Image (cartoon, helix red, strand yellow):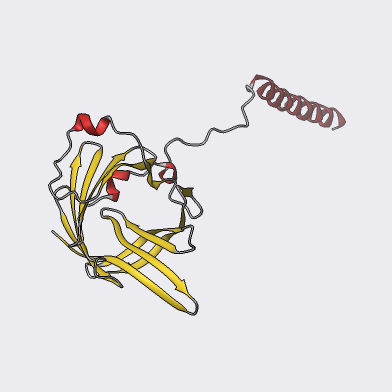
Amino acid sequence: MKKYLLIFISLLFLSACGKEQDVEEEIITTPPTDETVAPPENTPSEKAENLSDYFMPDKSIAQFKGEGNEYASYTLTTQRIGDYVVTYEDNGGTVVQKMYNIQDDKISLIAENAEAYDAKSPTLAELESMKEIEIYLGTPFEVGTEFNGWKITSVTATLETGLQTFEDVIVMEKIDEQGFTNRKYFAKKFGEIKREFIMQEGNEQFIVSSTIESIK
């Protein structure tokens, strides 16, 4: 009996040693892994904004309702030329022509002409030769982003207008040298849909605003 027990224990010992050897061999032959895992590229949160979406459609005419001043109401005509946009703002008193360059990370104002009653549409070559005057809209679209004296204060605002109710509106704010507050509101697929000028005089607040009302 003792003889058989001794043989059985020996077989168990040999089996355990064999398993131990296999595990040891696996550990030795397993190549080391790099603990640093590269983040996936082009995740949805990292995708760049298509800044072309922040202007009205080509050849569109939008009507803005003004409050607080007779010249706050205006019509906005939009023309797209490649990566450039030309707008004509007519408030009944004057026509202002503005030109913009759409880039990957910002929109630049490259020209602004007042009293542009008979202004001609610029050529692409003329637009390409123009230099940046200032940043009109900068990225990233996050609260706290600053450019040209403007600061993004919200990217999730809701704004009711005569056209529709907009969600996820970008709100920008700037306080000028006189302490007056200026705000702009941007919506995707439309661009600037509202602007405000706020002046505080004692306990009274004077507000001039222009809000989109229709587009065709």
Q: Quadrant of residue 11?
A: top right
Say which residue appears at 19% left-offset and 42% top-offset: 80
How far across and down, in percent of the image, does residue 65 sit? 23, 68
Say which residue appears at 30% left-offset and 39% top-offset: 101
Say which residue appears at 26% left-offset and 50% top-offset: 55
**Residue 108 shown left or right of residue 174 in the figure:** left
**Residue 213 shown left or right of residue 101 in the figure:** left
- How many numbered circles does the render carry? 0
Asked if residue 9 is positioned above or below residue 189 in the image, the reply reads above
How far across and down, in percent of the image, does residue 153 sit? 47, 59
Quarter of the N terminus within the rendering:
top right
Quarter of the C terminus within the rendering:
bottom left
Q: Nearer the viewer, residue 58 or 47?
A: 58
Which residue in the rendered view is the most extreme toward the right?
Answer: 2
How far across and down, in percent of the image, does residue 127 sit? 24, 34
Q: Quadrant of residue 174?
A: bottom left
Q: Nearer the viewer, residue 125 or 14?
A: 125
Q: Nearer the viewer, residue 129 or 158?
A: 129
**Residue 64 shown left or right of residue 6 in the figure:** left
How far across and down, in percent of the image, does residue 150 sit? 45, 53
Asked if residue 72 is positioned above or below residue 96 in the image, the reply reads below
